[in-house]
């Protein structure tokens, strides 16, 4: 069931959203050649806890990190590790959630480390742009298919493919609520968007085939063909005045 939020609840969610956004930005500032993914995870965790919040993903389904950190062909759910060193030329996806005053925020970005390939640059830009094309359709009266089709169409136009096995989601008191928010769809189809819906829109985009698999650590999702993947996510509220990005900081 979809949990619609009041304006007061959306205001509360802005607090969790801000902490999430700030922790993610801080992670991005620390990505450089030679640091480990565990080092980045420690920074995220310390910041969230300093704010009096809790990392949403720590312990979620047994996940051992505060952030998911996924490099290059790793799409999502990478486990932070002190033996995984970030290299020049890597693209690093960091996915952060924070729980504060009863609500969650969820946001992800793909950070370049040093000199990355032109293809990697194009992929990161397309993924982000497709998010905004999708969100432009996150208005009252539209349907979920309007968001998903806008995301998918833009990536197709760029020659990239969206992951289908993993999708965005509703968010609020739980980090994953109804409905599912796919990065594909048919315009005018799917659940109608209502005032007070709070969702995470999160394109996961591959330079090659969108076929993915889970590694034997039971978490890390990688592309089957080894191609690069990018991820971009914000938590947003659907209001009469249009979508509000709750995890975006200036
Ligand atoms: Mg996320
Ligand atoms: Mg999410």
Image (cartoon, grey):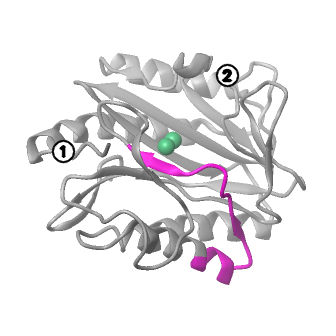
Badge 2 element: helix
Q: Quadrant of residue 1?
A: top left
Q: In this view, does 4 lie to the left or right of 133?
A: left
Q: Which x, y percent locates residue 38?
A: 67, 22
Q: In this view, does 107 lie to the left or right of 64?
A: left
Q: Quadrant of residue 161?
A: bottom right
Q: Which x, y percent locates residue 65?
A: 60, 21
Disc 2 to disc 1, C-alpha distance = 35 Å
Residue that label 2 marks? 38
The mark tally for this picture is 2
Q: Residue furthest right?
A: 225
Q: In this view, does 196 lie above or below 100?
A: below
Badge 1 element: loop
| Distance from mark 2 CB to nearest ligand 1 atom below 8 Å | no
Q: In this view, does 238 lie to the left or right of 90?
A: left
Q: Which x, y percent locates residue 101?
A: 22, 24
Residue that label 1 marks? 5
Q: In this view, does 189 lie above or below 19?
A: below
Rendered residue at 53%/21% (across/down): 60
Rendered residue at 54%/36% (across/down): 27
What's drawn in magenta, residue-wise? 153-170
Q: In this view, does 217 lie above or below 215?
A: above
Q: Which x, y percent locates residue 22?
A: 39, 38
| Distance from mark 1 CB to nearest ligand 2 atom below 8 Å | no
Q: Earlier in the sequence, mark 2 or mark 1?
A: 1
Is mark 2 in CB contact (under 8 Å) with mark 1? no
Density class for disc 2 (Cα within 10 Å; few <14, some 14-19, many ≥20) is many
Rendered residue at 33%/67% (across/down): 138
Q: In which quarter of the image is residue 92?
A: top right
Q: Residue furthest bottom?
A: 157
Rendered residue at 74%/21% (across/down): 81
Q: In this view, does 49 lie to the left or right of 66?
A: left
């Amino acid at each position: 069931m979809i949990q619609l939020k009041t304006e007061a609840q959306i205001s509360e969610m802005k607090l969790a959203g801000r902490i999430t956004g700030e922790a993610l930005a801080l992670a991005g500032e620390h990505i450089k050649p030679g640091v480990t993914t565990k080092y980045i995870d420690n920074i995220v965790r310390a910041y969230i806890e300093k704010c009096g919040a809790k990392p949403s993903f720590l312990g979620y389904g047994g996940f051992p990190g505060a952030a998911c950190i996924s490099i290059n062909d790793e799409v999502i759910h990478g486990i932070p590790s002190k033996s995984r060193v970030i290299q020049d030329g890597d693209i690093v996806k960091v996915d952060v959630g924070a729980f504060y005053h009863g609500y969650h925020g969820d946001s992800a970005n793909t950070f370049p480390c040093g000199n990355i390939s032109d293809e990697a640059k194009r992929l990161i830009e397309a993924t982000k742009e497709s998010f905004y094309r999708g969100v432009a359709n996150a208005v009252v009266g539209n349907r979920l298919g309007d968001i998903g089709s806008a995301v998918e169409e833009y990536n197709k136009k760029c020659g990239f493919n969206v992951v289908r096995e993993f999708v965005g989601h509703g968010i609020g008191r739980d980090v994953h609520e109804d409905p599912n928010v796919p990065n594909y769809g048919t315009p005018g189809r799917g659940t109608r968007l209502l005032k007070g819906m709070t969702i995470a829109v999160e394109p996961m985009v591959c330079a090659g085939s969108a076929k993915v698999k889970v590694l034997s650590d039971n978490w890390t999702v990688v592309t089957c063909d080894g191609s690069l993947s990018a991820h971009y996510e914000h938590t947003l509220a659907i209001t009469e005045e249009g979508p509000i990005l709750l995890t975006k900081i200036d």
